[in-house]
Amino acid sequence: MSHHRVRISVNGSTTEDEVEARLLLVHYLRDVRGLTGTHVGCDTSNCGACTVMLDGRTVKACSVLTVAADGCEVLTVEGLTADGELSPVQEGFRQCHGLQCGYCTPGMVMAATGLLLDEPDPDETAIRHGIEGNLCRCTGYAMIVDSVRWAAEHGGAGEAAVRHARGETLPSPGGRPVDTGAHGEPQPVVTP
């Protein structure tokens, strides 16, 4: 079996790993990085349970080889939480009961996050189109649509959460930037 060395940033943490050439990104995230929020549903790119963001775009991790993500930035559902706070999309799912069994929820949250980053104020048609690649067998989608609408009305996709996961400087509540550092710990920003 052919092995390759990859360097991938996941939720702001970059590591180098030796992986098999055929290892799918979903299995890398779960088995190598220990991030089990990304679910394996179909392994055929049909259900969306494995949706993550790869360099700012939503992808189905069961259809991406890990070697293809070399040098890329991956954001998983675990990376949306900033300083213990749910992202607006996660909070929307909580507030509007946008889940039942919960299996599709991480993928739905990531699809909704990608949608709201591209389209901050979507109507119902745009929301349904934005999540159409993600299957839910329990809810009938009405509460999921309500959850995404709630997020759009109460803070969008949580761009701050996405920036936090990337380790970028965030504006603080007082308006001064805060560097989250490598482990998300607030650090004073030193300016020259």
Image: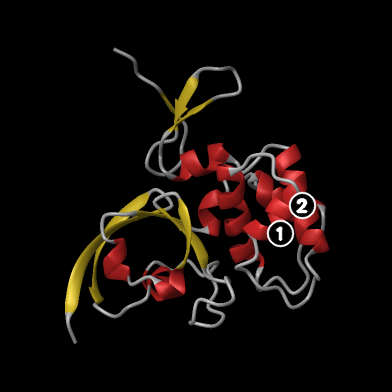
Q: Where's the N terminus, which quadrant?
A: bottom left
Check disc 1 and give the amino acid type: Arg
* Mark 2, residue position: 124
Residue at coordinates 55% horizontally, 39% vertically from top-left? 159
- In-image side of 106 versus 17 (left or right): right
**Amino acid type assigned to the residue bearing label 2 in the image:** Glu
Look at the image and name its color scheme: secondary structure
Q: How many marks?
A: 2
Question: Which percent across, then down, holds residue 155?
Answer: 68, 37
Q: Which secondary structure lies at badge 2?
A: helix
Instruction: Tell me if I can see residue 30 in this picture.
Output: no
How packed mark 1 is, by other alpha carbons closer than 10 Å (few <14, some 14-19, many 20 or more), is some
- 172 and 133: which is toward the camera: 133
- Considering the numbered disc 1 on the image, is that residue within a helix, a strand or a loop? helix
Locate residue 152, reporting x and y percent. Answer: 71, 42
Please determine whether, in this image, residue 115 is positioned above or below residue 180: below
Q: Residues at badges 1 and 2 in contact (C-beta under 8 Å)?
A: yes
At x 64%, y 44%, the residue is 85
Residue drawn at x 19%, y 67% is 5
Q: Would you say 28 lies left or right of 115 here?
A: left
Q: Which mark is residue 147?
A: none
Give the residue at mark 1. 128
Mark 2 packing: few (<14 Cα in 10 Å), some, or many (20+)? some
The quarter of the picture where the C terminus appears is top left
Residue 20 is at least partly visible in this image: yes
Q: Position of residue 180 (x, y in %)?
A: 44, 35
Residue 62, placed above or below residue 168: below
- Give the quadrant of residue 62: bottom left
